[in-house]
Amino acid sequence: MGDVINDMDNFNDVTEESPRDPDADKDNANQCKDKENKEATLSKSFKDEGKTDLDKLEHPFSCPNETSDLRLLVEGKPLYVSRVVLSLVSPILKSLLSMKGNDDNVEMPLSGKKYSHMVEFLSCIYPDILAPITEENAEVVLDLADNFQVSRLVDRCEDFLVFDISKTSPPPHPEKIVRYLSLAAKYELPKLQKATFEAAAKMPSDLLENIQAFWDLPAVTTTSLFIRRLKLFEKSGKTIRCKQKEIQNHCSLYHKGEKNEGNLCTKCYAQIGKHAINELQFI
């Protein structure tokens, strides 16, 4: 005990005798401030790490509400939904739910599905949301709509894809055309197939053939595409020949003294060439 008192006395003596250094006090203050900043950063980091991905998501299905009576488990995370809504839009989900019974706390796992994809799908079928079909979500939603046999949603996806591939400014990219041809064949979408055939038939063949996925398409698809392209060439050739005959008749009547080889004047030759270029520019 005496040693402790002596040590404290010695400490007090040294403290009283030692002059205060202003620079040292400033350094100590800076060190304390740095330490506080580090601790605050670490504390925030620990809080962020404690949050799950679900905590950071904001969508109508992340938390239960007055209409939700079912939890879909997708990739281990819950989606709170209404059995009535799912049963009305999908015969597949209606069948699955009927096997689950009418328990108040039904939980139904959906294996092989992605959480983000299911959120997109649910957003498109809920009547109070009805999220639009876009280029970013169309293929994801189409796959789930086909899987769950939501026919109206399949139609919405097809209508959007037809609109998207039919745009001429800017013209569709060859890879998009091949991808849409694949979707049309996979999901049996006749309107999309027709629109995509039209776009593909007007594109140079080498641009499509240089895409590996083109050769993965069903043989009936590639054959039909080349036949469609051949018919377009035949149609253009017939139109050009009719125009040529019309111009020749005009030239023989009004440009008799200006004819060159082939019974056409230079001006009429140029008109035929211009018409041919215009007719073939999209093939």
Image (cartoon, rainbow, N blue to C red):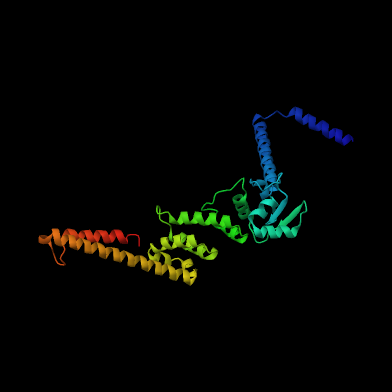
Figure disc tally = 0
Could you tell me if residue 265 is visible in this image? no
Q: Front-most of 53 and 183?
A: 183
Query: Percent x, y for residue 114?
Result: 63, 57
| Left or right relative to 235: residue 103 | right
Q: Front-most of 17 and 180?
A: 180
Q: Which residue, as the protein is rendered here, is positioned at the far left?
A: 257
Query: Percent x, y for residue 46?
Result: 70, 45
Q: Quadrant of the N terminus?
A: top right
Could you tell me if residue 54 is visible in this image? yes
Q: Quadrant of the C terminus?
A: bottom left
| Left or right relative to 269: residue 70 | right
Query: Percent x, y for residue 53?
Result: 66, 50
Q: Front-most of 231 and 5?
A: 231
Q: Front-most of 155 and 27?
A: 155
Query: Percent x, y for residue 89?
Result: 63, 54
- Whether 20 is drawn above or below 106: the answer is above
Which picture quadrant has residue 26? top right
Q: Residue at x 28, y 60 (%)?
A: 277
Which picture quadrant has residue 34? top right
